[in-house]
Image (cartoon, grey):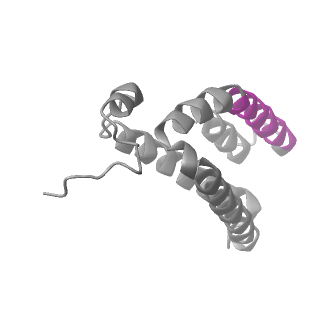
């Protein structure tokens, strides 16, 4: 959201394009630092939710899918930016706006998700793979 006014100011010729690039890199740096600080607690929480016997397979598959999605997504969106009819700056603006909208939609969808207390599930034997279940 911070970058949208900067892109508008470039169009109004009040800010140099180089300054928008520097602002973009600064925002990405701050976002990556915040993400790095939150990664360990998030993995700790998700490790509690995944049964111990399945953790290696689950996180390996998850990381593979995320890496593939990142690789393909960056290449495709880079192609969209470079091939945009109005130039690269409007193309970048459109891709940035799309990313912001998808991020807001993602946060909105997370509000509908119910929170699970893994300690209660552990006590009830939910994650015990060997225990027989009543499938009624």
The residue closer to the viewer here, 95 or 8, is: 95
The residue closer to the viewer here, 55 or 20, is: 55
Residue 59 sits above or below residue 113 on the image: below
Instruction: Please report the bounds of the magenta region as a residue range.
Output: 18-36
Residue 109 sits above or below residue 89 on the image: above
Taking the view exactly as shown, the residue that stands out farthest to the left is: 136
Residue at 39% x, 26% y: name it.
Answer: 119
Residue at 54% x, 46% y: name it.
Answer: 100
Q: Would residue 100 be counted in the magenta stretch?
A: no
Q: Would residue 28 be counted in the magenta stretch?
A: yes
Residue 78 spot, x, y in % from top left: 74, 65
Residue 55 spot, x, y in % from top left: 59, 48
Residue 83 spot, x, y in % from top left: 73, 74
Quarter containing the C terminus: bottom left
Residue at 82% x, 42% y: name it.
Answer: 21
The residue closer to the viewer here, 118 or 16, is: 118
Quarter containing the N terminus: top right
């Amino acid at each position: 959201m911070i970058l949208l006014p900067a892109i508008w100011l470039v169009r109004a010729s009040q800010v140099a394009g180089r300054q928008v690039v520097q602002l973009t890199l600064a925002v990405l740096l701050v976002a990556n630092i915040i993400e790095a600080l939150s990664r360990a607690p998030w993995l700790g929480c998700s490790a509690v939710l995944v049964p111990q016997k399945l953790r290696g397979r689950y996180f390996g598959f998850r990381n593979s899918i995320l890496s593939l999605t990142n690789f393909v997504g960056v290449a495709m969106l880079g192609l969209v930016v470079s091939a945009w009819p109005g130039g690269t700056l409007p193309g970048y603006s459109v891709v940035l706006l799309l990313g912001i909208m998808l991020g807001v939609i993602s946060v909105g969808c997370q509000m509908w998700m119910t929170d699970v207390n893994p300690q209660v599930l552990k006590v009830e034997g939910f994650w015990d793979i060997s225990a027989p279940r009543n499938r009624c």
